[in-house]
């Protein structure tokens, strides 16, 4: 097994193992007596060397550990049986569950999905009818028939009805403008999880189990908000204040936990019951459908089986919350010398596969700030926020190669600090930070916009903004080869050599042989970059989002298969510019990229 895992990516690509999914009939639920498994979960996850990035190493380690837990659990159940006949019956039951019961559940789920999506497929011909409408998306004009717009809406509703896996699939597809039409991507960007919160009793049970059942729930928290802060497709989040008894116990166990973080307030994320089993069944079905579609000659260039494989990895990464905790640890390490950027501190010491403890950040939501920014009537104050936001992203991309992959406004907050005259030390207290944000949030909740704008102006003038990023479950990290390709492409664009950029995009794509009209594609990229060059030399601002959107449209029409990680970087840049331009309409992200690149260079 270890020899297989140490061969980078090979085990994911081979047909026999590519579709391997841990039998989902085996629930990862352990009784109070079997505490050894919780001790294993609370050990820090170490990335396996077979991964070509830090995140892939963690993924391989998590999946390997999951397999070992299943094997160990079954072995323990067999050992507890003294009678050989009972042992044989248990072995038989394991085989029946894996090869009969689980396939039946998967088939029933397939029938359910077919019933949901069949009407949508039958209605597909309506996309060819109706008047063409012009849609505006990030300054890019999209022409779609009225029939297409109706069908896209039907597809979105079906995805929401199909459950968490398909909601996540739709959100992922909505970011892939290199594969799907901009109109479809625009509609899928409106996908919302319709997940109902699971019971508080289940959450309490899981939280106690993540701590090896050493504490009663009331011993862990002094305060616990029973209503979830948010409910997602995979998990829901609570807020609580750790008790002094629990903090002392953690400190006595020689962990590096500091109970003074946010005065003991933590956010606790708990995965929904049976979520892993449902998602694994859905992934099997998606893989089957992708293999069928891949047999169509006109669909080969999409490489759908490989894309579903990549999507499966993204989904399973989110099913192990220790990975998110380790992502937070790495982000905090990368930004340890920055006062202007903050990530919540994760606590891997008492987080598990299904429960995440992290520092609770009490910040002012970026979403609310964007709603009232125009009333500030001060571009300078807005730039104080946008400059910090952009600098943080450029560090993630250019210096660290470790990028938050979900940078929408809901995952960004603002705090306000006082620093010394050199800007190197914080002179204000956590209580002061809390009181400023608390007052702003209260005014926003009361819809007292005039007073809110007044207090916000005061905070921006008298304090230093601090950008806070939350929800680091998914990150983008380029492996060595993709990093080399990205730097080569960026060099060509920085020199305004559009033709070479187009050639590089084809040569270093996943399947260069499927590209259509390669020379024409390179000429189109050259023409696009020339337009950017003219605007730059006439002192006009360049919308890098417009540039990348047009480039992805050309990629799709010429069947150029981009690596998923590369497209994730592009999507992150689009989100970044979307927020940045709302705060600073004169923002020239392209110029900021080039200047940052020449000052620091790619690491």
Image: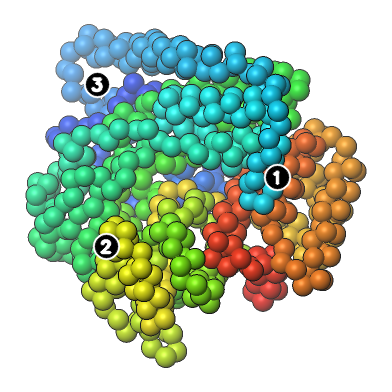
In this view, which residue lies farthest toward the bottom?
421
Residue 78 badge = 3
Whole-percent x, y for residue 346 in the image:
33, 57
Whole-percent x, y for residue 237 in the image:
29, 46
In the rendered view, tell whether residue 191 sits above or below residue 346: above
Front in this rendered view, residue 56 or 380: 380
Whole-percent x, y for residue 566 in the image:
65, 49
Determine crowd level at label 2: few under 14, some 14-19, many 20+ residues with C-alpha closer than 10 A: few
Marks 2 and 1, Cα distance to the nearest angstrom? 39 Å
Q: Is residue 322 visible?
A: yes
In the picture, measured across the screen, residue 561 lies left or right of residue 81, that is: right
In the rendered view, tell whether residue 24 sits above or below residue 376: above
For the point 40% across and 75% down, the residue is: 457
Q: Is residue 349 visible?
A: no
Marks 2 and 3, Cα distance to the nearest angstrom? 58 Å
Ranked by sequence position, the earlier of labels 2 and 1 is 1
For the point 18% across and 50% down, the residue is: 225
Determine crowd level at label 3: few under 14, some 14-19, many 20+ residues with C-alpha closer than 10 A: some
In the picture, measured across the screen, residue 124 lies left or right of residue 372, that is: right
Instruction: Provide the residue designation for mark 1.
Output: 141
For the point 77% across and 72% down, the residue is: 539
In the picture, measured across the screen, residue 185 lies left or right of residue 131, that is: left
Ranked by sequence position, the earlier of labels 1 and 3 is 3
Q: Quadrant of the C terminus?
A: bottom right
Front in this rendered view, residue 585 or 27: 585
In the rendered view, tell whether residue 317 sits above or below residue 444: above
Ranked by sequence position, the earlier of labels 2 and 3 is 3
Mark 1, secondary structure of its residue: strand
Instruction: Provide the residue designation for mark 2.
Output: 442
For the rendered model, the colour scheme is rainbow
Whole-percent x, y for residue 554 in the image:
77, 42
Determine crowd level at label 1: few under 14, some 14-19, many 20+ residues with C-alpha closer than 10 A: few
């Amino acid at each position: 097994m270890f020899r297989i895992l140490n061969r980078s990516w090979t085990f994911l690509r081979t047909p026999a193992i590519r579709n391997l999914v841990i039998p989902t009939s085996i629930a990862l639920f352990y009784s109070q007596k079997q505490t050894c498994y919780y001790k294993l979960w609370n050990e820090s996850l170490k990335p396996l060397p077979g991964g070509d990035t830090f995140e892939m190493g963690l993924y391989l380690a998590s999946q390997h550990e999951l397999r070992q837990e299943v094997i160990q659990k079954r072995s323990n159940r067999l050992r507890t049986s003294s009678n050989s006949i009972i042992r044989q019956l248990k072995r038989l039951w394991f085989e029946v569950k894996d090869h009969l019961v689980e396939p039946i559940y998967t088939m029933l789920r397939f029938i359910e999905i077919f019933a949901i999506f069949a009407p949508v497929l039958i209605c597909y011909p309506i996309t060819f009818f109706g008047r063409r409408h012009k849609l505006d998306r990030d300054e890019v004009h999209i022409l779609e028939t009225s029939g297409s717009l109706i069908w896209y809406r039907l597809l979105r509703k079906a995805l929401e009805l199909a459950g968490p896996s398909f909601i996540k699939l739709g959100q992922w597809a909505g970011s892939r403008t290199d594969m799907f039409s901009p109109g479809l991507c625009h509609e899928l960007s409106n996908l919302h999880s319709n997940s109902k919160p699971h019971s508080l009793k289940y959450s309490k049970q899981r939280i106690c189990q993540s701590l090896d059942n050493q504490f009663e729930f009331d011993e862990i928290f002094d305060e616990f908000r029973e209503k979830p802060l948010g409910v997602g497709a995979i998990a829901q989040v609570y807020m609580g204040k750790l008790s002094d008894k629990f903090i002392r116990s953690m400190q006595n166990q020689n962990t590096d936990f500091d109970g003074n973080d946010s005065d003991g307030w933590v956010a606790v994320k708990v995965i929904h019951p049976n979520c892993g089993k449902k998602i694994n069944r859905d992934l099997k079905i998606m893989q089957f459908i992708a293999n069928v579609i891949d047999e169509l000659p006109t669909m080969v260039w999409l490489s759908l089986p490989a894309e579903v494989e990549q999507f499966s990895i993204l989904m399973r990464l989110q099913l192990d919350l220790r990975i998110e905790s380790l992502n937070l640890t790495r982000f905090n390490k990368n930004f340890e010398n920055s006062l202007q950027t903050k990530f919540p501190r994760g606590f891997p010491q008492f987080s598990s596969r299904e429960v995440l403890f992290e520092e609770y950040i009490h910040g002012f939501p970026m979403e609310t700030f964007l709603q009232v920014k125009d009333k500030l009537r001060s571009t300078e104050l807005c730039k104080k926020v946008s400059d910090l936001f952009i600098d943080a992203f450029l560090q993630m991309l250019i210096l660290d190669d470790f990028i938050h992959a979900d940078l929408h406004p809901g995952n960004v907050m603002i705090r306000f600090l006082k620093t010394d005259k050199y800007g190197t030390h914080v002179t204000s207290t956590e209580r002061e930070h809390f009181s400023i944000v608390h007052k702003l949030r209260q005014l926003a909740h009361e819809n007292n916009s005039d007073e809110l704008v007044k207090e916000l102006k005061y905070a921006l003038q008298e304090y230093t903004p601090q950008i806070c990023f939350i929800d680091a479950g998914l990150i983008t990290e380029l492996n060595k080869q993709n990093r080399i390709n990205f730097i080569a492409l960026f060099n060509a664009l920085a020199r305004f050599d559009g033709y070479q950029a187009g050639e590089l995009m084809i040569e270093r794509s996943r399947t260069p042989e499927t590209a259509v009209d390669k020379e024409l594609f390179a000429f189109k990229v050259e023409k696009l970059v020339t337009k950017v060059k003219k605007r730059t030399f006439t002192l006009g601002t360049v919308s890098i989002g417009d540039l990348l959107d047009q480039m992805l449209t050309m990629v799709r029409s010429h069947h150029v298969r981009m690596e998923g990680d590369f497209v994730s970087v592009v999507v992150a840049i689009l989100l970044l510019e979307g927020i940045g331009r709302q705060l600073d309409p004169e923002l020239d992200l392209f110029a900021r990229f080039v200047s940052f690149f020449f000052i620091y260079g790619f690491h």
